[in-house]
Image (tube, rainbow, N blue to C red):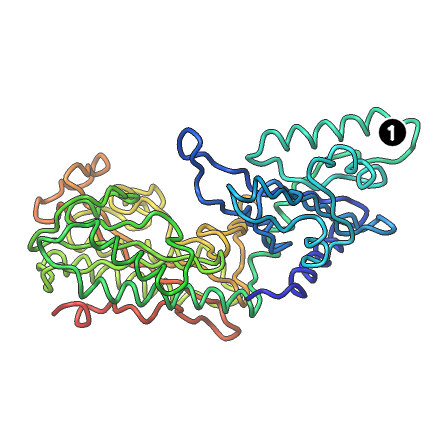
């Protein structure tokens, strides 16, 4: 559980960085599934990171220059008739006490109250995001203040994105955040281990999905962190396969990419294993190649290493292995530079993980310099190989022997950067060949 003291520390850290600016954060919009049926509400991650408040139609204002109100909230007021239909609201008075705001107003008073927190700011910090109506509100107030600037001599001269500040803050996880992530991982590990035993030829992919997500909810998770991928046979060659409607066949591999979200913090695990309990020779060769690449890539996770070293390590091993198998030919440096391996491995080797599955954080600092790894960052390491029935090699590369077709493999773990190296948080799910064969 994240305590209010930590949310307050995060706001103080952000306010130190913006100086005389005012930062604005809007809650996530309510998304409509169809007609008047809404999706389950999921709060905007930046808004939640700073407030812990999980209701729609809310705005957070951070104004360190204001003499009285440095942290201001606009929220939905109490309304019994609406709450009967849509659920309880915290309301204005309770929000002030519960969330530690200096001032809380009804969201209906945003246009009236907001100018007092902007007129003395030297700039507005706001990321123009997916809520077009709120984007318009911010631009409208900024334009009004710009028009009156000559008479007042104060006001924001620019709008600057909050993303660079928030990304740097969110990349390094606190002890409380890591505790939430460990809980998400523990639930996801149990779910994966269960379905490895449950999966049998003749069962359907959606049965596996149901078992996974049953355990997620049974253990207290909010649900899947992303649409669960349960891909058998040639479906494993589709990176974001989510239909999950095919019957599993004898001799197929099953690729499962699934994780849960616990208190908004996410796990992300992929395993590929033989449904019948035994790899075919071709499956085993490719699987061991991907595993070799993954283990070598994970070994590069340590403080001070550039982020791209993880991907580059995996690519070199995969390319050399594909050359040894006759699936690629030529000079290894040229193949890597010209990305001739892309028909078989078309994605990067991982991403940041946290409040979002593809979490906030930069990967590159300018055109050349890569982000260096820091203690308490969490990232995924997930190399793969995909040789579908429609896969075509780059011109000038060898034809693909049919024996390799229909095989898709990905192995993904969640890895914490520690002071001395790394910790594989998801190590509880087997991935060695001898562990996966029955």
- Judge whether residue 173 can be spotted in this image: yes
Residue 153 vs residue 400: left or right? right
* Rendered residue at 55%/46% (across/down): 44
* Rendered residue at 84%/49% (across/down): 65
Q: What quarter of the picture does the N terminus occupy?
A: bottom right
* Rendered residue at 75%/34% (across/down): 158
Q: Farthest residue in the top direction?
A: 147
Residue 177 vs residue 104: left or right? left
Q: Farthest residue in the bottom direction?
A: 420
Q: What quarter of the picture does the C terminus occupy?
A: bottom left
**Front in this rendered view, residue 195 or 394:** 195
Q: Residues within 10 Å of mark 1 (few under 14, many from 20)?
A: some
* Rendered residue at 85%/52% (across/down): 68
Residue 407 vs residue 294: left or right? left
Residue 134 horizontal/vertical position (percent): 64, 33
Residue 96 horizontal/vertical position (percent): 72, 54
Residue 366 horizontal/vertical position (percent): 57, 45
Q: Secondary structure at mark 1?
A: helix
**Pointer 1 residue:** 149
- Judge whether residue 313 can be spotted in this image: no
């Amino acid at each position: 559980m994240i305590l209010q003291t930590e949310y307050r520390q995060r706001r103080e850290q952000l306010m130190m960085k913006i100086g005389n600016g005012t930062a604005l954060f809007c809650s996530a919009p309510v998304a409509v599934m169809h007609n008047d049926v809404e999706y389950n509400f999921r709060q905007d991650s930046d808004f939640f990171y700073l407030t812990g408040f999980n209701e729609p139609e809310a705005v957070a204002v951070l104004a360190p220059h204001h003499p009285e109100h440095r942290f201001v909230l606009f929220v939905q007021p109490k309304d019994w008739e609406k709450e009967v239909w849509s659920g309880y609201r915290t309301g204005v008075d309770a929000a002030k006490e519960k969330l530690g705001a200096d001032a809380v107003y009804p969201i209906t008073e945003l246009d009236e109250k907001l100018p007092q927190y902007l007129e003395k700011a030297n700039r507005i910090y706001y990321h123009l995001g997916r809520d077009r109506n709120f984007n318009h509100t911010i631009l409208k107030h900024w334009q009004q203040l710009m028009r009156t600037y000559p008479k007042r001599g104060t006001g924001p001269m620019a709008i600057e994105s909050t993303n660079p500040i928030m990304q740097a803050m969110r990349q390094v996880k606190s002890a409380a955040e890591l505790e939430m992530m460990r809980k998400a991982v523990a639930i996801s590990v149990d779910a994966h281990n269960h379905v490895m035993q449950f999966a049998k030829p003749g069962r359907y992919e959606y049965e596996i999905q149901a078992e996974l997500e049953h355990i997620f909810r049974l253990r207290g998770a909010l649900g899947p962190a992303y649409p669960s991928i349960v891909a058998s046979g040639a479906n494993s060659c589709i990176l974001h396969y989510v239909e999950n409607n095919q019957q599993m066949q004898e001799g197929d591999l099953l690729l499962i990419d699934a994780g849960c979200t616990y208190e908004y913090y996410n796990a992300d695990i992929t395993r590929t294993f033989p449904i019948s309990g035994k790899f075919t020779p071709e499956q085993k060769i490719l699987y061991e190649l991907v595993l070799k690449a993954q283990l070598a890539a994970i070994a590069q996770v340590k403080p001070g290493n550039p982020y791209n070293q993880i991907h580059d390590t995996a690519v070199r091993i995969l390319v050399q292995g594909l050359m040894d198998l006759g699936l690629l030919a030529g000079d290894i440096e040229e193949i890597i530079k010209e990305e001739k391996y892309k028909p078989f491995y078309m994605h990067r080797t991982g991403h940041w993980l946290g409040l979002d599955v593809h979490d906030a954080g930069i990967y590159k600092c300018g055109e050349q310099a890569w982000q260096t790894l820091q203690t308490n960052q969490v990232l995924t390491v997930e190399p793969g190989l995909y040789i579908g029935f429609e896969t075509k090699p780059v011109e000038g590369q060898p034809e693909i022997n049919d024996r390799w077709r229909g095989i898709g493999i990905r192995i993904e773990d969640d890895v914490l950067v520690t002071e001395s190296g790394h910790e594989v948080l998801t190590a509880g799910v087997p991935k060695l060949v001898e562990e996966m064969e029955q």
